[in-house]
Image (cartoon, rainbow, N blue to C red):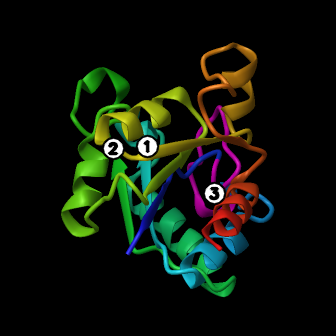
Amino acid sequence: MPTIILDRDGVINHDSENYIKSPDEWQAIDGSLVAIAKLKSAGYQIAVATNQSGLGRGLFSQSALLAIHKKMTQEAKASGGFFDMIVFCPHHPDANCVCRKPRTGLLQAINARLPLNADSDWLVGDTAGDLKTAQLMGIRAALVETGKGDQEIITGVVSRETTPVFKNLAHFASWLLDIQI
């Protein structure tokens, strides 16, 4: 079964320079939860791989993060979607861990449970780091302009010539499902 790996902040929900620290601050991007439901109903497994350095910075607790993920899961379910797996890096960027994207630890954890296939699987993110992680794991990558994605294009860190770029997750899902027909 093919897998779509999603970054969380900036792809599924609105991002914040001040971090998403509570369920109240977590707000889905318009169309993202319906897109997840459409991908699930088309036979895709959905995994989330997210860096959460706010934990390592002491900005919120692991119980707060779990409450955020519970809200995200409940809202996805209410829209007809489901997450097969959620993995996160809790470390500060200076920790030099193997799980923080663009390193591959999070995707390796997903691969152990949902074996990844270079021919069918995608990582959808909003940063060049997300794209690099997919490249290192040998799967396809797409950038969404939500979150930090538009700035990655404006600054030239990501090129439309070499990377599939979409307005948001809903546009990616529509494109992917259309080409699968």
Is most of the magenta stretch helix, strand or loop?
loop
Mark 1 or mark 2: name the one nearer the start of the chain. Answer: 1
**Quadrant in the rendering for residue 96:** top left
Distance between mark 2 and mark 3 Cα atoms? 19 Å
Give the spatial CA distance, label 1 vs label 2.
5 Å
Where residue 37 appears, as percent x and y from the top left, is 63, 78
| Front of the two marks 1 and 3 | 3
Q: Nearer the viewer, mark 2 or mark 3?
A: 3
**Image quarter in which the N terminus is found:** bottom left
Q: Which residues are magenta?
A: 11-24
Q: Are marks 1 and 2 in contact (CB under 8 Å)?
A: yes
Pointer 2: residues within 10 angstroms few (<14), some, or many (20+)? Answer: many
* Residue holding disc 2: 90
Locate residue 135, reporting x and y percent: 38, 35
Using the image, tell me which numbered label, if any, was put on residue 103: none
Image point (66%, 77%), residue name:
38
Q: Amino acid at mark 2?
A: Pro
Identity, as a three-letter code, of the amino acid under mark 1: Gln
Find out whether residue 129 is within the magenta segment.
no
Residue matched to label 1: 52
> Residue at position x 23%, y 68% from top?
113
Image disc number at residue 12: 3
Callout 3 amino acid: Ile
Residue 116 in view in this figure: yes
Disc 3 is placed on an element classified as loop
Whole-percent x, y for residue 172 in the image: 68, 55
Using residue 117 as the reference point, say whether residue 33 is left or right of it.
right
Mark 3 surroundings within 10 Å by alpha-carbon count, few (fewer than 14), some (14 through 19), many (20 or more): many
Give the structural element (helix, strand or loop) at label 1. Answer: loop
Q: Earlier in the sequence, mark 1 or mark 3?
A: 3
**Residues at marks 1 and 3, CA–CA distance in whole angstroms:** 14 Å
Seen from the viewer's position, the closer of residues 19 and 177 is 177
